[in-house]
């Protein structure tokens, strides 16, 4: 499941490179919203689902609101739509008999963003990540290409 959109030429090229790099036997769905329903309706006999990525999924929803309202964002509606999307995805994860690999980013480790839209994005992605983290069995934080298992906690 790929969530990127080609909003400019550079991003179009990135998407094209990702498409070329995928194994030929993979079934790939490309969508900006409603991932849970799309996966549920198209899972077939697939045993593994890769979602790349939640970061862009939340961005897609936020960008729709920025684009449609010309920078004035209805925070409650935007959050409601992000939470509905994550809820739909959570329902899918719980009901589909497959393993899920979900890619997302942690954007709350740095400075507090200077502008409202960036802070809203950081907060919405953080909430989405927290909800997904409650559902999944394992979580790995990647730093410099090195995985650190944070769920379940490592036994000392």
Image: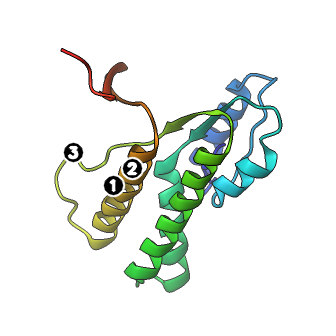
Mark 3 — residue? 109
The answer to which image quadrant residue 73 occupies is bottom left
Residue contact between numbered discs 1 and 2, judged by CB atoms under 8 Å: yes
Residue underneath mark 1 = 126
Q: Residue at x 42, y 72 (%)?
A: 79
- Closer to the chain start, of discs 3 and 2, is 3
Label ID, residue 129: 2
Q: Residue 50 at x, y = what percent?
A: 61, 35
Q: How is the image coloured?
A: rainbow
Seen in the image, is 78 located left or right of residue 8? Answer: left
Q: Which residue lies at the image location 46% right of the left edge and 80% below the top edge?
A: 77
Disc 1 versus disc 3: distance between alpha carbons?
Answer: 10 Å
Find residue 108 and name its label.
none
Residue 130 location, x and y as percent?
Answer: 35, 51
Q: Mark 3: which secondary structure?
A: loop
Cα distance between the residues tagged 1 and 2: 5 Å
Mark 1 vs 3, N-terminal side: 3
């Amino acid at each position: 499941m790929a969530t990127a959109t080609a909003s400019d030429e550079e991003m179009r090229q990135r998407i094209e490179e990702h498409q070329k790099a995928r194994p030929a036997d993979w079934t790939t769905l490309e969508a900006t919203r409603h991932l849970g329903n799309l996966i549920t309706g198209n899972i077939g006999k697939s045993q593994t689902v890769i979602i790349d990525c939640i970061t862009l999924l939340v961005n897609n929803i936020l960008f729709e609101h920025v684009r449609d309202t010309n920078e004035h964002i209805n925070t409650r509606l935007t959050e409601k739509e992000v939470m509905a999307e994550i809820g739909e995805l959570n329902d899918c994860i719980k009901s589909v008999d497959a393993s899920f690999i979900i890619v997302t980013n942690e954007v709350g480790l740095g400075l507090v963003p200077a502008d409202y839209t960036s802070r809203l994005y950081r907060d919405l992605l953080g909430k989405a990540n927290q909800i997904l983290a409650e559902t999944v069995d394992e979580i790995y934080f990647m730093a410099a290409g090195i995985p650190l298992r944070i769920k379940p906690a490592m036994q000392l």
